[in-house]
Amino acid sequence: MKKTGEGMFVLFIFFMFCFLCAFGHPCERQCDDGSEPLKCHYKFTLHASVIDCDHCQRNATCGGGSCEFSRKLALTINKKSPGPTIKVCKGDQIVVDVVNRLPGSFETSIHWHGVLQTGTPYYDGVPKVTQCPLTPGSSFRYSFSAENPGTHFYYASSVSQHADGIYGALIVNEPQKYKHEELLLIGTRNYALLSGAYGAVQGALVGLNRPIAKIVLNGKAVHEKLDEFDVTEGETVFRVINAAAFDCPVEMTLENHVFKVLNVQGADILPIYVKKLTIYPGERYDMQIFLSGEPCKYCQMQISGLHKCGQLEKLKTIVRPAETREIINKKPFKTLSANCTEDSNNYCSAQLESPDSPNFEFIPDLTFFLSFGLNKVSQVSVDDVEFRFVLNDIEYYPTFLDSGDEDPTLAPQINTVSFRPPSTPILTQYEDRNEATECETYANLVPSAANRPPTTCKSAPYFCECAHFIRAGVNATVKLVFKHDGISNEAVAFHMHGHKLYVANWQQAGREGKSNQRPICRDTIVVPPAGEVTAFFKADNPGFWLLESRAGHITSAGVGMALIVQVGTPKDIPSPPTGFPTCRGLKPDDFIF
């Protein structure tokens, strides 16, 4: 009888597995008005896994030739990269148990890009800011409301772990939003693991200038069996996410078609039709397709890399339109990009407009000037850098720092300082912080350098790494002026945690600035080359929130171009749940996160 009972249990588990494979997660459903919200539970186990030959085309030779990436080591979620797509309805409760089974001493955490975390700042997933990092073998439960609808995604806060494969899509649907939709999750694949000691062994920390090998779409690359799409023109909505960890914008086109852009990062816009769409890391677009030329049964969609991905092979897949409902002939068609010059063939992404005027007063209580870019710094010594890795008695440093070179080197900075995480999680262990490593940019001052900590930093032009803050009271209207001042001719994307930004003004290359009377809310903005962007937000979500440029991240190193936005005092911030983990001095000086 006991064996029979065990057999029935195994059979039950098998059928439940088959059910989930066939029908997906129970929270992945049609969202209806008045329906009760669900509690949506997921388990993410993080591994280092060998990605096998599942995606190779049948005529490819596994282990070599055109499928040379078929046996590469990657960091995975449930042994897959990208990880599971979380698809829920607005108002659902998302619960994710993350188990760290990564090798060696890999610490980790997960950030939920686009989720505002109103009232739950301790689940934002930024190590040493909102939580302790997950040590090897440990687990952590994230639990937050799917409050703001839209196309979002998640990833490891460690940029190298994100680049090595820990990322996935997060969709929060609304009732009657889209009838049919398809996901285009764009990422990258590396030549080798970039994380921790693996990165040092593979040379990622000692001058590998081309860590990115391929652009991937829904986890599949060129010469693999790419996803193809059967769609209805003017009805099917593509949710497009650029989830690349590094500075890898992409351009998208579709043969004989234009894109009708409907929504940006969860905000509806006045629709525009574009022939080419440029998407920066962290950006998301919802769009439909419309015929603009001769009909095609097998229309080629092309995704091309820019900046660090500019030399990569283009990714091409097939879209099969079911029928043609409307032909758009608004020629010449424009490109949507971060280019904000007087180009009549281009839409500047900063000028996208909301259908309605915002319920927001653009009169700032506080103004912060943020000058950023790659700056020349004098020779960097061991004492100046927190992040150092020792392998076989050889010291490895972040690739933007060359301690053996007497000439000035380039460091990603905001107001002349590079970002260093606090010594302990500032959100939950405020009293334990080390104030000697903190610096601050003050409000309402003309553009100036951050106030450097005197005991740990020399004055400019020497390199300074500190926990950089700007501070605002609860419900203050905050104005941020981003100015691209460094040695670079590329546009740069910034992501704001915990709040969304209204882009009110912008200018590029010394041209007269322009304003937007109906700006949209977005968590990721793009500052044009040699340009300036003015953005506003209401500081109505108390907490410690990261403002970061993923383009400023350097392989296996510190964040670089980032700072912490403190909203309110510690007394204003919601208390973490009972038993929330604490930590002190977990990260040794010779540990790279």
Image (cartoon, rainbow, N blue to C red):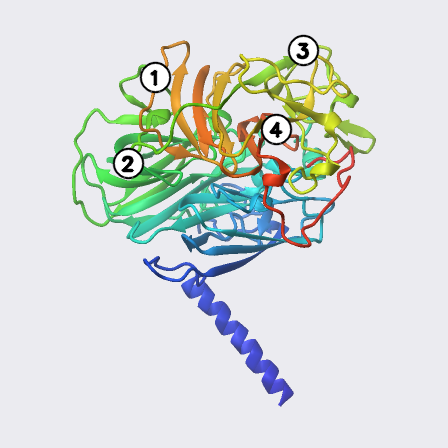
Residue 380 occupies quadrant: top right
Q: Is residue 366 visible?
A: yes
Q: Are marks 2 and 4 in contact (CB under 8 Å)?
A: no
The three-letter code of the residue at mark 3 reads Pro
Q: Is residue 104 left or right of residue 214?
A: right
Residue at 68% x, 11% y: name it.
Answer: 460
Under circle 3, the secondary element is loop
Three-letter amino acid code at the position of disc 2: Phe
Circle nearer the viewer, 3 or 1: 1
Q: Earlier in the sequence, mark 3 or mark 1?
A: 3
Residue marked by disc 1: 514
Q: Which mark is residue 554?
A: 4
- Quadrant of the frame with the C terminus: top right
In the rendered structure, which disc, 4 or 3, sits on the residue that comes first in sequence? Answer: 3
- The local crowd at label 4, few if under 14, some if 14 to 19, many if 20 or more residues have their Cα within 10 Å, is many
The crowding category of the residue bearing disc 2, from other C-alpha atoms within 10 Å (few below 14, some 14 to 19, many at least 20), is many
Please tell me the numbered disc located at residue 108. Answer: none
* Sequence-earlier tag: 1 or 4: 1
Q: Which residue is mark 3?
A: 461
Residue at the disc numbered 2: 259
